[in-house]
């Protein structure tokens, strides 16, 4: 899913001309990858590997931060104090995940501010799912169930990514993530099993809106993913888009049965010979529209992030100014006490 | 804002070390941005100890960390590999005293 | 079945009202703090503000659950939180003031308002919890014993920000002075003494508000001095949220907060 941006980026020209030494280093590097070794921050790596990772990790981070907004929309309207608490804790985790990922990307020679600048200027992408609106409370449960469910499927393989700082961040994230899907499913189960007719209708209506966009989270079909081969080679991407998508459908259909909701796909059915569920065609026009910036909330999401950043500029500047003043005061007082200790001339 | 201007106002990067409980070492758990050391300690508490992961925190400016050069890995660390006499398992003792 | 959930009506005693004053203050403050989630000036501080909101929410839940028990009609924390009429909330008006978003008719607050409010309120709550730890109501004493640690941390974190912003740039100092002018008049209510306070003090339930003033004033002045800020001149203004008579902001806060419970009578969440 976080490779969604990689899959939709234009193919780049690799540097064809390399020195002999660089070719040797790259061969050694590929051997380390083949042996399943971890690459750390200061190890030699091909420039293309470094660039690919910066792009993927930073866009993964952006996804977490932007992902706070559709759920943040409902915090002040949460229907009980317990649900308000849970939702706040979940969104807070997402901020933390973004933070761990920005930190991992910074080990590759970029800075948090540079990455944010790329996001705010529209150059960097984030997962397209967050460009959909949250229109009812049931969306909170459905996002936990489907969107976090899809995220978990992507994240677990990434804990074995060849680039160690990314892998370590993913281990931390996965540990925290399991509560995200469970709380969403739990919220839906309560509404479906013990709620009113109106609540059950709200849940079904929410599923109807989020099902197809959730499937699109896994990115374009394998044949159309531009960077998959190289990413797989380098141990960044370990399972294909279509395989992950199929895995997601199979797991989720069973969960939908437990909930008692209908998946809005008339072509969905178990295929005995494949051992998987067949499902209907995805509207890839919608996918490309949303990825291209013309989904329901693209402009609002980016505007909210830009506003938070710009509104916070005076705060960040003040903190730096104060820190500088404190340092000057410390130096002045150190100097003063040194002078006081010197014997009289 | 221009890139050079952001570089001046960007909060510096700090590395965070957490001691999970009394008796254990501080372990590196990640990094964060803060304007000064006092803020860095508080934010480390907010970001890295929400699930009761810690009893003590260290923060160090990333720029103050000196790391060994990976290119020197062979020189620095391989010679340690054949000094196995430093490991207790190198010494075969009679069973009666092997609990040392 | 009603189309919307009707308000509950509480049977009031001085004890209940005393507890609700604190619980509602924590609830509405948490509600305002939660507005920052996803919009903070830095990712790390966003997490810090949400932690504070979660702490306050936890305190509110404990107090409202206890209040529901004291009240005796069998209500739970959510019915108290979401189904009272505005007149039956008893929070300090201070916590209703805007923090980030503007309401329909008034300018919004900013981060300066937020850190100042956090600092003033945490200092007040710390003084309150400290004394409440000795309450004759053992449940209340237990809640206070845990909450005082949270208030100490909030006071330190917010106080450090007040200093940073007061003694930062010209812009941040200007915003802090504006924030002080906005908040100061609403602090008189924090230290009033009325019949409910007197009854609580007499029975050992908890301190009267005026007994918190000396400690609060000295701690607040210490931080303001480091922040190169001074307290605005006193005015005769007194807010009345603790009497159930709120600012115009409260209606909007409650409309948003209560909307789902009102819309789904009998709903299970």
Image (tube, rainbow, N blue to C red):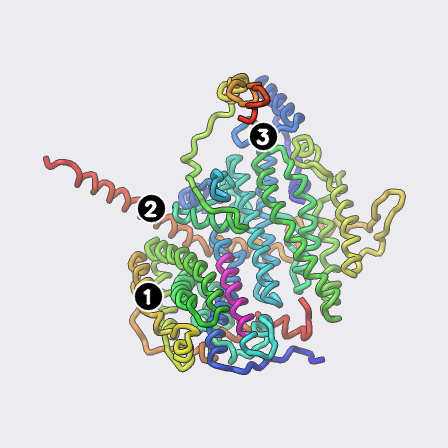
For the residues bearing labels 1 and 3, Cβ distance under 8 angstroms: no
Q: Nearer the viewer, mark 1 or mark 3?
A: 1
Q: Chain of mark 3?
A: A
Q: Residue A176, position in %: x, y? A: 60, 48
For the residues bearing labels 3 and 2, Cβ distance under 8 angstroms: no
Q: Chain of mark 1?
A: C
Q: Are marks 1 and 2 on the same chain?
A: no
Q: Is residue A99 visible?
A: yes
- Taking the magenta stretch, the answer to whether it contains residue C66 is yes
Q: Residues within 10 Å of mark 3 (few under 14, many from 20)?
A: some
The quadrant in which residue A136 appears is bottom right
Q: Residue at x 50, y 68 (%)?
A: C139
Query: Which residue occupies the extreme left position in the image?
Result: A345
Tell me which segment is drawn in magenta. Answer: C50-67
- Does C188 sit left or right of C140 as displayed? left
Location of mark 1 (residue)? C215
Location of the C terminus of chain C (image quadrant): bottom right
Query: Which residue occupies the extreme right position in the image?
Result: A273
Q: Residues within 10 Å of mark 1 (few under 14, many from 20)?
A: few
Q: Nearer the viewer, mark 1 or mark 2?
A: 1
Location of mark 3 (residue)? A39
Location of mark 2 (residue)? A324
Magenta-colored segment: predominant secondary structure: helix
Q: Chain of mark 2?
A: A
State the residue in front, C41 or A302. C41
**For numbered disc 3, what is the local secondary structure?**
loop
């Amino acid at each position: 899913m976080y490779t969604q941006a990689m899959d939709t980026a234009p193919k780049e020209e690799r540097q064809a001309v390399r020195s002999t030494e660089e070719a040797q280093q790259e061969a050694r590097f590929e051997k380390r990858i083949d042996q399943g070794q971890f690459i750390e921050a200061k190890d030699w790596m091909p420039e293309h590997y470094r660039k690919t990772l910066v792009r993927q990790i930073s866009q993964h981070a952006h996804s977490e931060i932007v992902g706070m907004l559709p759920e943040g929309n409902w915090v002040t309207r949460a229907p009980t104090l317990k649900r308000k608490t849970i939702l706040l804790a979940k969104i807070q985790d997402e901020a933390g995940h973004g933070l761990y990922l920005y930190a991992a990307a910074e080990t590759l020679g970029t800075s948090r501010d540079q990455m944010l600048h790329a996001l705010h200027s529209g150059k960097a992408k984030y997962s397209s799912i967050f460009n959909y609106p949250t229109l009812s409370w049931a969306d909170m449960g459905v996002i936990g169930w489907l969107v976090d469910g899809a995220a978990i499927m992507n994240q677990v393989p990434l804990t074995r990514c060849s680039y160690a700082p990314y892998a370590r961040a993913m281990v931390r994230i996965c540990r925290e993530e399991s509560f995200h899907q469970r709380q969403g499913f739990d919220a839906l189960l309560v509404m479906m099993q013990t709620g009113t007719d109106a609540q059950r209708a709200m849940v079904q209506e929410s599923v109807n809106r989020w099902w197809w966009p959730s499937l699109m989270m896994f990115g374009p079909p394998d044949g159309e993913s531009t960077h998959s081969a190289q990413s797989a080679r380098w141990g960044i991407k370990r399972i294909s888009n279509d395989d992950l998508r199929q895995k997601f459908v199979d797991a989720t259909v069973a969960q939908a049965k437990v909930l008692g909701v209908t998946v809005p796909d008339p072509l969905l059915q178990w295929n005995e010979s494949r051992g998987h569920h067949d499902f209907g065609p995805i509207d890839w026009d919608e996918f490309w529209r949303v990825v291209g910036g013309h989904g329901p909330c693209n402009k609002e999401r980016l505007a909210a992030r830009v506003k938070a950043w710009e509104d916070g500029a005076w705060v960040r500047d003040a903190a730096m100014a104060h820190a500088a003043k404190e340092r000057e005061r410390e130096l002045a007082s150190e100097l003063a006490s040194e002078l006081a200790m010197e014997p009289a001339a | 804002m221009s890139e050079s201007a952001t570089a001046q106002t960007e909060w510096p990067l700090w590395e965070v070390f957490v001691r999970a409980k009394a008796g254990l070492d501080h372990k590196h758990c990640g990094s964060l941005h803060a304007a000064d050391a006092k803020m860095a300690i508080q934010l480390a508490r907010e970001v890295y100890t929400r699930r009761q992961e810690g009893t003590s925190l260290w923060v160090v400016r990333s720029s103050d960390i000196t790391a060994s050069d990976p290119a020197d890995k062979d020189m620095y660390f391989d010679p340690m590999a054949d000094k196995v006499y430093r490991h207790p398992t190198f010494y075969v003792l009679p069973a009666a005293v092997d609990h040392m | 079945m009603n189309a919307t959930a009707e308000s509950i009506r509480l049977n009031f005693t001085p004890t209940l009202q005393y507890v609700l004053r604190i619980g509602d203050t924590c609830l509405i403050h948490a509600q305002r703090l939660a507005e920052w989630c996803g919009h903070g000036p830095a990712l790390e501080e966003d997490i810090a503000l949400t932690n504070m909101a979660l702490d306050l929410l936890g305190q509110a839940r404990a107090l409202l659950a206890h209040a529901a028990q004291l009240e005796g009609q069998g209500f739970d924390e959510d019915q108290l939180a979401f189904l009272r009429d505005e007149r039956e909330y008893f929070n300090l008006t201070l916590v209703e003031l805007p923090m980030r978003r503007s309401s329909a008719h008034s300018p919004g607050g900013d981060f300066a308002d937020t850190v100042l409010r956090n600092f003033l309120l945490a200092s007040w709550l710390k003084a309150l919890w400290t004394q409440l730890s000795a309450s004759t109501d053992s449940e209340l004493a237990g809640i206070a014993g845990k909450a005082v640690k949270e208030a100490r941390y909030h006071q330190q974190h917010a106080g450090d920000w007040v200093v940073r912003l007061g003694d930062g740039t010209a812009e941040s100092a200007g915003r802090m002075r504006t924030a002080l002018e906005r908040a100061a008049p609403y602090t008189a209510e924090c230290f009033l003494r009325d019949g409910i306070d007197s009854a609580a003090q007499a029975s050992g339930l908890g301190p009267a508000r005026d007994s918190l003033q000396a400690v609060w004033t000295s701690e607040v002045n210490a931080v303001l001095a480091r922040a190169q800020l001074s307290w605005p001149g006193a005015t005769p203004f007194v807010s009345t949220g603790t009497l159930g008579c709120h600012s115009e902001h409260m209606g909007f806060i409650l409309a948003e907060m209560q909307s789902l419970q009102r819309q789904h009578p009998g709903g299970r969440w």
